[in-house]
Image (cartoon, helix red, strand yellow):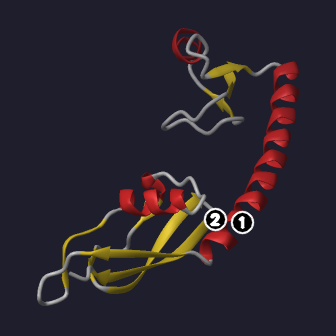
Amino acid sequence: MKIILLQSVRGLGDPGQIVNVKSGYARNYLIPNDMAIYATKGNVAQTEYRIEKSKELEIKRISELEEVCEKLNKVTLKFELQTSEEDKLFGSVTPQMISDALLDNGFKIEKKDIEIPELIKTIGSHYVDIYLHKDVVAKIKVKVKALSA
């Protein structure tokens, strides 16, 4: 039986794909759970139209995110933290700290979108990746200095 997937199904396909599955799987699981619809001519045409519209919206969204990315690339966050005598931090700079600092600068970035390549446990300049989209990644500078007593 041919169906059109409405959402991503592991091991089967992505939204908008037309796939062949056993009729029981389609009737008893995929269609009742709004994961797929029957692949009739009308549904295929409607799905193709919906996919075109979503591609247009995605292109527009990516261009907006690229503008945000350019602004983020110019951002430098500064942290003053307690250090030991060897200039090592007590703790480290966390994604939550970066997210909060970005919020203070007018950027609402969730901590799950922040990737710190190496733990920031020393003073100095470090770079952190911000994933705005799978194709749009910003790189911000994080400066850490010792807290003056």
Amino acid marked by disc 2:
Val
For the residues labelled 2 and 1, the Cα–Cα distance comes to: 6 Å
Is residue 1 visible to the viewer in this orientation of the structure?
A: no
- In the image, is residue 88 above or below residue 34? below
Name the residue at 42% across, 63% down: 98
Q: Quadrant of residue 14?
A: top right
Furthest-front residue in this view: 149
Q: Residues within 10 Å of mark 1 (few under 14, many from 20)?
A: some
88 to the left or right of 136: left
- In the image, is residue 79 above or below residue 5? below
Q: Which residue is mark 1?
A: 66
Residue 116, position in %: x, y?
A: 38, 69
- Given residues 117 and 75, the one toward you in this image is 75
Q: Secondary structure beneath disc 1?
A: helix
Q: Residue 19 — which label? A: none
Name the residue at 80% across, 38% down: 51
- In the image, is residue 79 above or below residue 40? below
Q: Residues within 10 Å of mark 2 (few under 14, many from 20)?
A: some
Give the mark nearest the N terminus, 2 or 1.
1
Amino acid marked by disc 1:
Glu
41 to the left or right of 15: right
- Given residues 88 and 9, the one toward you in this image is 88
Q: Secondary structure beneath disc 2?
A: strand
Q: Quadrant of the C terminus?
A: bottom left
Name the residue at 66% across, 35% down: 15
- In this rendering, the label closer to the viewer, 2 or 1: 1
Is residue 22 visible to the viewer in this orientation of the structure?
A: yes
- Given residues 6 and 73, the one toward you in this image is 73
96 to the left or right of 123: right
Q: Residue 136 — which label? A: 2
